[in-house]
Image: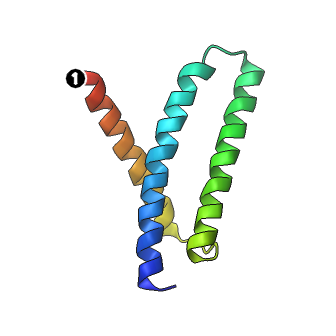
Amino acid sequence: MTLHEQIILIIYSFLYGIIFSFFLNWNYKYVIKLKTLFKVFVIFIMVFDFSLLYFLGIKYINHAIFHPYSVLCIILGSILEIIIQKKCKKE
């Protein structure tokens, strides 16, 4: 894998972490009011869809070669989104 593909994968994973965390929090606000079985179903479908979108993206970027640093970038993107969300709520 070339350096260009690795940089694009890192950026894609980071942005994916931000977007996934945002939609997970947004979805949680609406799902909390539902019954337990329906909650599990809706959350499972959402996570499954986002996982498919991620793997379709890395298939396009580097033929679906998965690297450990992409998981780290997803986690860092999620943490950044949580920090930004907390700062926005304080203001």
Is 45 rendered above or below residue 13? above
Q: Residue furthest left?
A: 91
Q: How many marks?
A: 1
The way the protein has been coloured in the rendering is: rainbow
Image point (72%, 39%), residue name = 45
Is 20 rendered above or below residue 27? below
The quadrant of the picture occupied by the C terminus is top left
Image point (31%, 30%), residue name = 86
Image point (51%, 29%), residue name = 26
**How many neighbours does mark 1 have within 10 angstroms: few (below 14), some (14-19), or many (20 or more)?**
few
Where is residue 36? Give x, y as percent: 72, 19
Instruction: Identify residue type, mark 1.
Output: Glu
Give the left or right position of residue 27, taking residue 7 as reference: right
Give the left or right position of residue 1, taking residue 14 as reference: right
Badge 1 marks a residue whose secondary structure is loop
Where is residue 76? Give x, y as percent: 39, 53
Give the left or right position of residue 49, taking residue 83 as reference: right
Image point (38%, 41%), residue name = 81
Q: Quadrant of residue 52?
A: bottom right
Q: Residue furthest bottom?
A: 2
Q: Which residue is mark 1?
A: 91
Where is residue 4? Give x, y as percent: 42, 80
Residue 72 seen in render: no
Where is residue 71? Give x, y as percent: 50, 60
Residue 27 seen in render: yes
